[in-house]
Image (spheres, rainbow, N blue to C red):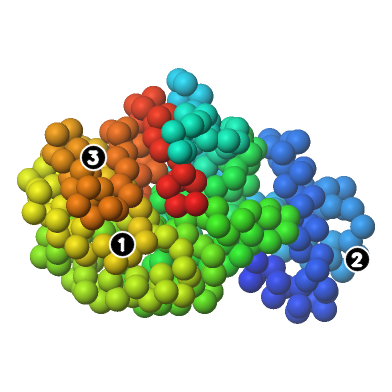
Amino acid sequence: MTVRSLFDAGDIRREFEDAGLDPKFIPIIWKHVIQNLKQNSECQEWDWEKQVPSLPSAAYSLLRSKFKMPLSTSVHSVFHSSDNVTSKLLIKLHNGAFVEAVIMRYDTRLGKYGGKPRPGGLRSTLCISSQVGCKMGCKFCATGSMGFKNNLSSGEIVEQLIHASSLSEIRNIVFMGMGEPLNNYSALVESVRVMTGSPFQLSLRRITVSTVGIIHAINKLHNDLPGLNLAVSLHAPVQDIRCKIMPSARAFPLEKLMNALQEYQRNSEQKILIEYIMLDGVNDEEQQAHQLGKLLETFQVVVNLIPFNPIGTLSQFKTSNEQKVSRFQKILRGTYNIRTTVRKQMGQDISGACGQLVVNQPDKNFLQNAGSMTDIEDLVM
Ligand code: SF4
């Protein structure tokens, strides 16, 4: 029997329809599966009648014949930060490949709003992978250096949430792990629809998708997932620098990308998160801050400046020093009135840009430093 994920919504729906079964049973099955997995994550044998009560007998026959186990992936290992804030899950896919998902537990009292601690309490954000490797080849990114291996199915994406939920109650999702999510568009859309439906019930407003700027996908995103948060890895204010550090920019020229973002913002009426990795001597000069300010001044955006995290021999770039980052931030804020934050702990933080991971090199150091980052919820919501 091939290993399939019960959480591949399109797949299981087709099976149900072919068997003449009502798809209304699917979320009920998911709910029981999640509850049972939480209670018994080591489960080796799966007894559908026992684990999911009160289904029509044809549904049991279908489940037994098509799904030996409900999940197609397993947690290979979990790395916990020393301060208990961040946990990294190394997840093994049925084809033997690995992806990573990262949980960031955030205490609202660490953040300020209007000069006061934010209300709320503890909340967790999950950084999810959408592909094994990535074909976009950004020069500052470890994942890009791996090349592209394969797309994740929607079920494999959802299963990252299921695995993470056994460790922490997840409130926010960011597609900033391995891969370019908009290059795996149908699986992305389907997985987000599952996550926002029964029984997961996450709010679409608490899900953020990060992209290098795949224009044709941005053009349909608002229609397919209205209310979703969009983050764009811009990383340069002009086309030639963008092309140097992000080869994919040649296919998605800056001017066309900005037009697509304008349209997206007009339709969604939502802020866009702009990610900007600070590379010494490449994109961090005053002139570039002004160019970025002018480029963005008509948009509703939050700019997140991300000091580059060196990735060893995989990249020749250096991190911008603190003075340059702070001057860049001042120009965007002071001259252009653009809300601009600095990710101080980018050093080892994999959630900052989209996918700075190489799965066979789990880096425990980042876990010790990720705690004081600004939570995504405070940036875009
Ligand atoms: S930064 Fe994102 S899009 Fe670029 S190579 Fe890395 S994973 Fe791919």
Q: Which residue is mark 1?
A: 212
31 sits left or right of 345 in the view: right
Residue 30 in percent (x, y) is at 74, 55
Q: Nearer the viewer, mark 3 or mark 2?
A: 3
Q: Is residue 322 visible?
A: yes
Q: Nearer the viewer, residue 12 or 82?
A: 82
Q: Nearer the viewer, residue 100 or 303?
A: 303
- The residue depicted at 73 percent of the width and 55 percent of the height is 199
269 sits left or right of 233 in the view: right
Residue 208 in percent (x, y) is at 47, 56
The disc labelled 2 sits on which kind of residue? Pro
Q: Quadrant of the N terminus?
A: bottom right
- The residue depicted at 76 percent of the width and 44 percent of the height is 35
Q: Nearer the viewer, residue 249 or 254?
A: 254
CA separation, marks 3 and 2?
56 Å
| Labelled disc at residue 307 | 3
| Labelled disc at residue 56 | 2
The disc labelled 1 sits on which kind of residue? Val
- The residue depicted at 21 percent of the width and 64 percent of the height is 295
| Numbered label tally | 3
Give the mark, 1 or 3, whose residue is nearer the N terminus: 1
Secondary structure of the residue carrying numbered label 3: strand
28 sits left or right of 346 in the view: right
Secondary structure of the residue carrying numbered label 2: loop
The disc labelled 3 sits on which kind of residue? Pro
- Label 1 C-beta lies within 8 Å of the nearest ligand 1 atom: yes
Answer few, some or many: residues within 10 Å of disc 3's Cα (few below 14, many 20 plus, some between 14 and 19). many
Secondary structure of the residue carrying numbered label 1: loop
Residue 191 in percent (x, y) is at 57, 62
